[in-house]
Amino acid sequence: MQTEFRNKDFITLEDWSRGEIDTLLEVSKDLKQKFAMDADTPYLKNKTAFLMFFEESTRTRNSMEAGLAQLGGHANFLDTSTMQVSHGEEAKDTAIVLSSFGHGLACRNCDWDIGNDYLTTLAEYSRVPVMNLQCDLYHPMQALADLLTIEEKKNNLENLKVSVIWAYATTHKKPISVPVSQVQLFPKYGMDVTLAYPEGFKLPDWVIERAEASAKKNNGSLTITHDMEQAYEDADVVIPKNWGNWVTDPHDEEGSDLLEANQDWKCTEEMMNMADDDVIYMHALPADRGNEVEDSVIDGEHSVVFDEAENRLHTAKAVMTLTMGGRG
């Protein structure tokens, strides 16, 4: 078990070793058990974290706020539209000031080609650990909760067929950060990952290269297909979720012609019947019901989305416990 985590940034799980991630999982499980038993966990007593949000949030904000309160600390929610950031204050100055006020700094900034750079700048100048609450490239909090959920439901992770599948949605042009984090993390645990999407919705080449290298090192695999049925066939885990075509079209507005041409990329009962009998359906939420997925699937016996969402609390608490209060 790795033990030195204090002040370690949590921007991408690519910066965390398998052993360090295993420790995060073990701490998450311990905190989850203590939460169920209503046991006190005052590991961050009187500690303060600042949570900067450039976008809306439900699970991420509340898992961090509730989590830190349950650890004995306090989270300051910061809507960046009410901060001097909105008047042009630079990340360097914000990081220096806020990190001098408390013990942790977290941020969500999903602006394409901006968000991750903003987070890494915060980390460069912060004197406390910086936690990524989702950027344009990574969502490590979600990926960690997903990994915990799969482990809970499937026990043995090696050679599980886990399919990360693009799905049709109309709400907004979603970041690629969830699938990017998943396809880089899961092969590290020997999973056989299938990445399925229509032409035009590719992920960056460097993501695929890293995922393939990780799969080779850890006896997993990465398969890329534009055939949705291939992804569902005999799958142990399916994660159908929309993401925008940022790589092929880096503009805020979704290309309507390309999007509308792929309305058939939807998680249906018919698709689920092609998967393994014990398949689990996962989604980071919020799901675009009726577009990404049929109600009968997301509310059905194979869905674990609410267990997955609950795990956001326990994994967030583990990240904060180790980085804000762990041994240095």
Image (cartoon, rainbow, N blue to C red):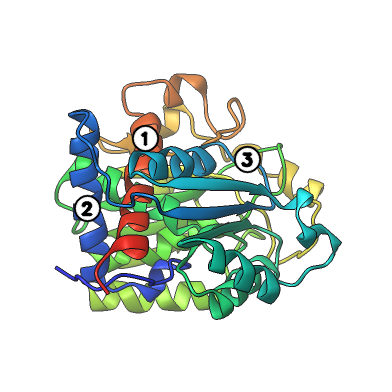
Q: CA distance from mark 1 to mark 2?
A: 15 Å
User: In the drawing, does residue 37 fall left or right of residue 255?
Assistant: left
Could you tell me which secondary element the residue under label 2 belongs to? helix
Q: Is residue 231 visible?
A: yes
Q: Is residue 220 visible?
A: no
Give the residue pinned by disc 2.
Answer: 27
Res 308 quadrant in image: top left
| Residue 30 placement (x, y as % from top left) | 18, 45
> Which of the two marks, 2 or 3, is nearer to us in this view?
2
The answer to whether the residues at label 1 and label 2 have Cβ atoms under 8 Å apart is no
**Within-10-Å neighbours for mark 3: few <14, some 14–19, many 20+:** many
Give the residue pinned by disc 3.
Answer: 168
Identify which residue, 114 or 275, lies in the foreground.
Answer: 114
Q: Relative to 241, is 85 above or below?
A: below
User: In the drawing, does residue 279 fall left or right of residue 14?
Assistant: left
**Residue that appears at 57% across and 35% down:** 292
| Residue 18 placement (x, y as % from top left) | 24, 70
Instruction: Choose the circle earlier in sequence order: 1 or 3.
Output: 3
The quarter of the image holding the C terminus is bottom left
Q: CA distance from mark 2 to mark 3?
A: 36 Å
Q: Relative to 264, is 4 above or below?
A: below
User: In the drawing, does residue 104 fall left or right of residue 26?
Assistant: right
Could you tell me which secondary element the residue under label 1 belongs to? helix
* Amino acid found under the numbered disc labelled 3: Tyr
Q: Relative to 258, is 96 above or below?
A: below
User: In the drawing, does residue 124 fall left or right of residue 210?
Assistant: right
Give the residue pinned by disc 1.
Answer: 310
